[in-house]
Amino acid sequence: MVTSRQVRHHSSDQRLLILKEIYEVLGGADIATIEYEGPEIAVYVKNPKFILEHEDKVKELARKLRKRIVVRTHPKIRKSREYTAKFILEHAPPDSGIVDIQFDDVLGEVRVIAEKPGKILGKSKAFRNVVLAETGWRLEVYRKPLLRSGILDTVLRHLQRHSEEIRKARREIGERIFREMLVGTRHVRVVGLGSFGEVGRSCILVDTGESRVLLDVGLSPSGYGPNAYPYLWAPEFRVEELDAVVISHAHMDHVGLLPLLFKFGFRGPVYVTPPTRDIMIIVLKDLINLARREGVEPPFDFSDVEMALTRVIPVSYNVVTDVAPDIKLTFTNAGHILGSAMVHLHIGQGMFNLLYTADFKFYRIKNDRSTRLLPPADYQFHRVEALIMEATYGAKDTPPREKAEEELIHLVNDVAKKGGKLLIPVMAVGRGQEILLVLNEAIKNGKIPEIPIYVDGMVYEVTAVYTNYPELLVKPIRDRMLHQGENPFEGPSTVYVTDYSKRDEALNIGGPAVIIATSGMMNGGPIVEYFKYMAGDERNALVFVSYQAPGTLGRRIQSGEREVELRFDGEIRRVKVKLRVETIEGFTGHSTRSELLSFLKRLRPKPRTVILNHGEPSALASLASTIKTSWQRLGFETPPLVEVPENLESLRLYPSNIKTKTALLYA
């Protein structure tokens, strides 16, 4: 048996071996210092030309050590920002369309925003090497987005202003990640702190004895207050013992309470994909503003959001990253919204592998679906012992996507003929962009009249982020954006509501119109303002295009409630619902029942344990029953252990006698 003292000694030896290996391989680069910065080992050098000539050595070193190695120039050898910007402008191709140059002192990067980034980089990317050798700054080139987000610009400026604080935070985080192990991996246990037996407030604690990592920390869509929060007061959860937080995507029920952890004193890392970082800041700031407009004190303030931002570590898809001494993280595409990720945890040097799907969309591409925004979720992994899978639609299938689009187009035409307005509640992230895409395509192809499409809420800001990451969208959309310079989210009649005058215009316009507004479940935001004034007119219609959680205003209206209480300037009034109410389900970003089963069938390798969450009890029970009775048809060689825990339940995944549990389950 390995003792804790031996584990600590081994960990210390490992650090010395890593440093020795780096000096042996990269010594010719004149190493100034080596720092642990978050999950990366940062090597600061004074001779960047050595790195340019031996880039293969850096890659080989990272593979050998199984660590993320980044080489940066020492700040003392970097030329001034003014000199570097001038050098780039003078030597870059004149027709590249440079619109902005930004500097990141933490990463030692100069970021060039250009209309034609390929012109700057060239086929061999020689210009990047020239800039590094001449200025000491590593050049990164980005395409000018088709839309610009004011909030995102503010975020980037905040990161630049707090570069020293971020550098300090990352070094603190790095020391914790690469610390000497205390006891080693003793077990693998998951505790449901939210989203078990329900939809919303996703939050899962993964405990290995050595480390504790939180997967998501969301807010219930039904409102504010402790009943909408995860069970952060559970005895297993201690914020001071938390090693890291991993956020799967930027919907409020997965990220909505992240700043509260920092309000409680958490100062560890938060791992996200780059688009998730950008979107989550937008939606978290909007949550604060929305709560205050409704007279509710938000659970955190802007300073907590900014504190969280300084601890965020973006990680791209399929990049293996250390998040704790005994846990490695890999994000893979989940197909749900931009930046959404499945979370794969490699625990204890290969001892156990856990896959958390979070919200995901799995489908088979049989033909060109040019209106689908994202590629389907990944389903091939190296190892998976246990799977935590969402079951939002575990009990039913929704109509095909093509039928959903036909229904929406028919509804727009029907409402337009009557001279009414069509109100569409959407989530700012995902559904808003999908609906915009469909309606713009329908106008372009003459399927609906060219009536105004008003877009209110945070949809514009989030859509701007979508235009920043065209490479993550499906090929037809990506090609239109990259090669044709077309913005698929804007059409001839698209009107983004940026002030109250535009909102009044949308309400009082004489003819028909479509109004797309947040929030998607009508639990606040501009959608409620429109609904107040449109509910009494039978010519108007309200159509739900996404899931409505129990307890939300949207769910109540969808279920048939035709008189609701709403606030008008601080006064509560009863509003009669006379407009037409419809539901079109085929636009969901979640996997339907058949898609969930198809994912399980194609998933490689097959897990020994399947844990279902993020679903209403009926959906969870239905899907669990099907998996138990159809495991052979789903491709399992032996019956999997199927678990449907409730919140506050703990599951020990390792060590565990799976055979005995499974035998009892199927007896």
Image (cartoon, rainbow, N blue to C red):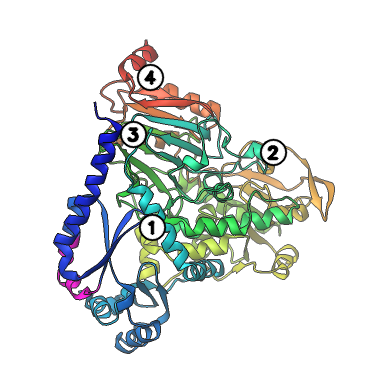
What segment carries the magenta color? 46-58
Q: Which residue is mark 4?
A: 629
In contact (CB < 8 Å): disc 4 and disc 2: no
Dot 2 falls on a residue whose secondary structure is helix
Q: Which residue is mark 3?
A: 183
Q: Nearer the viewer, mark 2 or mark 3?
A: 3
Question: Of residues 86 and 517, which is closer to you in this image?
Answer: 86
Q: Earlier in the sequence, mark 4 or mark 1?
A: 1
In contact (CB < 8 Å): disc 1 and disc 2: no
Question: Of residues 489 and 107, which is closer to you in this image?
Answer: 107
Q: Earlier in the sequence, mark 4 or mark 2?
A: 2
Q: Amino acid at mark 4?
A: Thr
In the depicted structure, whether residue 62 falls above or below residue 554: below
Quick check: can you spot residue 530?
no
How far apart are labels 4 and 1 at the CA level? 50 Å
Q: Amino acid at mark 1?
A: Arg
Q: Earlier in the sequence, mark 1 or mark 3?
A: 1
Q: Nearer the viewer, mark 1 or mark 2?
A: 1
Q: Is residue 169 left or right of residue 77?
A: right
Q: Nearer the viewer, mark 3 or mark 4?
A: 3
